[in-house]
Structures are given as structure tokens and as C-alpha cells.
Image: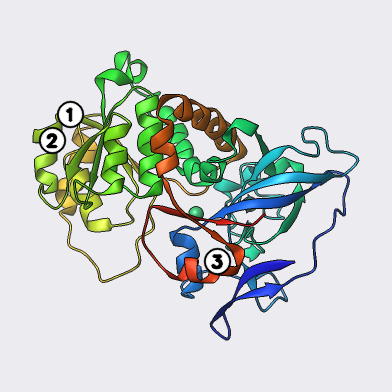
Amino acid sequence: MKALAVFPASREVRLIEQPEPVIAGPTEVKLRILEAGICGTDREITSFQYGTPPLNSPHLVIGHEALGEVIDVGIGVTGLARGDLAVLTVRRPCPHDTCAPCRKGRQDFCITGDFTERGIKGAHGFMTEFVVDDERYIVKVPKELREVAVLLEPLTVGEKAAEQARFLTQRLPGDLKDDPSQLNAVVLGAGPIGLLGAMKLVNGGFKTWVYSLDKADSPNVKIVSAIGARFVSSAEHPPADLAKIIGNISLVYEATGAAKISLDVLSVLSVNGVFIFTGVPGGRAPIEVDAEQIMRNLVLKNQVLCGTVNAGRASFEEGVQDLGSFMQRFPAAVRALITARMTLDDARDAVLSRGGIKSVIKVA
Ligand SMILES: [Zn+2]
Ligand SMILES: [Zn+2]
């Protein structure tokens, strides 16, 4: 079967032939991959900044955002059947008995760092024709979501952020944790992760704002308006203006990976505010920030800064519910997130090029 792989030692990215995987255990499931999404992580892997092949393999098959159809199941599989649509989670647990998160199925909180991630770290990914995995890493998707379910993995970034924010707001008394309609939430960045996060916030009842560099007439900003969120241009308004435009900012969902602008927005976070980071900065030159002011605000305003990586199975399940709800409320906006569909033969060019919001490889 065909697969798109990177060879880090020789710095090559190419389509390869791989043996088709077979079911080897009773709880394993075989999927025919229907679609696989491309994201910034894939672009980092194919530019050799990131990505680790499995042990004893010179190459890594990339792809970690996939929708598949179940074509075979092991005899012990109970939750999936042939013909079901399903998405795969990404991170697999480390082997250590001492890692409580991994032993509890929350490898997104792994403490040893010895986890693997399909298509990213130590395990082949999903930009290929067939995949086999254990049923506990596979989440069923209703047939009605076929055309957009490839967006589930990027949505889980927002789902886990929401899980963290819910937990962090439990510390607050009364209305502040009960009535999101009185709270302003700001999304930093209008890429797929930001826009899906904005949909989650709108759907959750927050007054939602998206702050990004995009032009007001860009397709990304059209999606912001279509879902009932409001746009503020970071090209026109510096972070210091944000609180004047918006009012109290109770929650920030960062989806840019840009440290400077994010920390500048932190300076206008409200009393009791929660700021969730999801982006990974590129490691450019050090930036200057007013650490005194950041620390003073964190203390005097009871603020919380929280980072989140990857997502657990519950975030995928909640994502399935939310994506269904988004498709009821603003189907055209959800569809508009996918701006290109290419074949596996064109996957290399698709990953190496840029543009659009979300490009998807149609495998089957
Ligand atoms: Zn991704
Ligand atoms: Zn672990």
C-alpha cells in the first residue's frame, strides 16, 4: 500500500510502498483511511524540524488527523463493527508502570516522555491506505459527519483546552463558572485550531472574539462572522487596545504559537482570568516581556496560565458531539474550513506547499 513518509537521515519526503498492516490481537481494528488532514506539525516534520521514525525504521509515515472506515475487527472488539466510520487518537502510552497518567489512559499527561505519537514520534501515521490499531484508540463517528470528520483531531485541541478551562474555573464562586454568556473569550489566531476553538466557544455560549493578523475580507475572517464570533485585527489594534474594545477578557485560547503577541495579550487578561496556551513557538530569538507586570497580574488578579498538549479519548468523544452540533448551527462555516482536497499521489506537494485553511488528502 502507498504511504507518505519522511526519511530524516537523508532529508527526503516521498511516497513509499509499505506492507499492508494486519490484525494481530483480539482487540485490534483495521481501518481503510478515507481522508487525512495536513497541519503545521506535518509541515514541521517534512522540513525535518521534528518527527522521529519508529525504532529500527529509517522512515516515518506522517499524518495524525485521519478519518477511516472499519473494514475488519478482532474477535474481542466490542464497540466497532465493519462499515463504521471512525477517527484515531494520536498518542500511545509509555510502557512504564510508574506512569500513572498512561496507566489510566491519559497519556496526554504522560510524565516519562516515553509515549509515542502516530505520525509524529516513534510510530507510523495515517497518511496511508490502511491502519491497524487497538479499539481503545479509535472513536466511532456518525455517518452524517463523513464530510467533516477529518477535522476532529484538530478540534480536540480546543476540546482539551475546554476541559482544562472548566476545571480551572471550578475554583471560582458563583456565576463566573456557571454563565458563559456574560464572559468574553478571546481566540488568538484564525487557523484551523483557532477557528474550531472559536466554534467550541460560541457553541458553549461565550461572547467569542478572534484576534488575528488575517485581513478582514479573508476566508478565515468570513468564518469568524459566520459563526457569530467577532473579529479584531491584530494588524490594526495592538494587544493593549483589546480590553478597551472587548471589555473584561475572562478566557484566552491561544492558537498562534507566537510568544510575543500572546504574552502581550496576557497583560490585558481580566481578574480571575484563565489563559490557555496550545501553540508551540518556533524557538526563534528571545523576546522581551515585562515579567514584573506578568507576575504582579497573576498574583493580584488570581490569574491562571495553563498549557495543554494532545488530547485524551474523552476529548475526541466530546468533539464528535460538538462537531455534530456545529453542523446543525453553522454547517457552511464548518465545510469552509476544508479549502482543498488532494489525492495521496499529490500528498507530498500538498504537505510541502502552504495556503488555504485546511488541506485534506483523500486517500480512498
Ligand atoms: Zn495536526
Ligand atoms: Zn507515560
Image height of 70 relative to 205, above or below: below
Residue 341 in the image: state x and y as whole percent: 51, 55
Residue 356 in the image: state x and y as whole percent: 37, 56
Marks 1/2 in contact by CB < 8 Å: the verdict is yes
Image height of 14 relative to 289, above or below: below
Q: Nearer the viewer, residue 72 or 250?
A: 72
Marks 3/2 in contact by CB < 8 Å: the verdict is no
Q: Badge 2, how many Cα within 10 Å: few under 14, some, many 20+?
A: some
Compared across the picture, whether 39 is left or right of 244 comes to: right
Which residue is label 1 attached to? 248
- Residue occupying the point 85% across, 53% down: 23
Sequence order check, earlier mark of 3 and 2: 2
Q: Nearer the viewer, residue 74 or 329?
A: 329
**Residue 9 in sight here:** yes
Give the mark toward the camera: 3 or 2.
Answer: 3
- Residue occupying the point 9% across, 41% down: 241
- Residue occupying the point 40% across, 43% down: 336
Which residue is label 3 attached to? 347
Give the residue type at disc 1.
Answer: Asn
Name the secondary structure under disc 1. Answer: loop
Sequence order check, earlier mark of 1 and 3: 1
Q: Nearer the viewer, residue 19 or 41?
A: 19
**Residue 252 in sight here:** no
The residues bearing labels 1 and 2 have C-alpha atoms spaced at a distance of: 6 Å
Quarter of the image with the C terminus in it: bottom right
Name the secondary structure under disc 2. Answer: helix
Q: How is the image coloured?
A: rainbow
Which residue is label 2 attached to? 243
Q: Badge 3, how many Cα within 10 Å: few under 14, some, many 20+?
A: many
Quarter of the image with the N terminus in it: bottom right
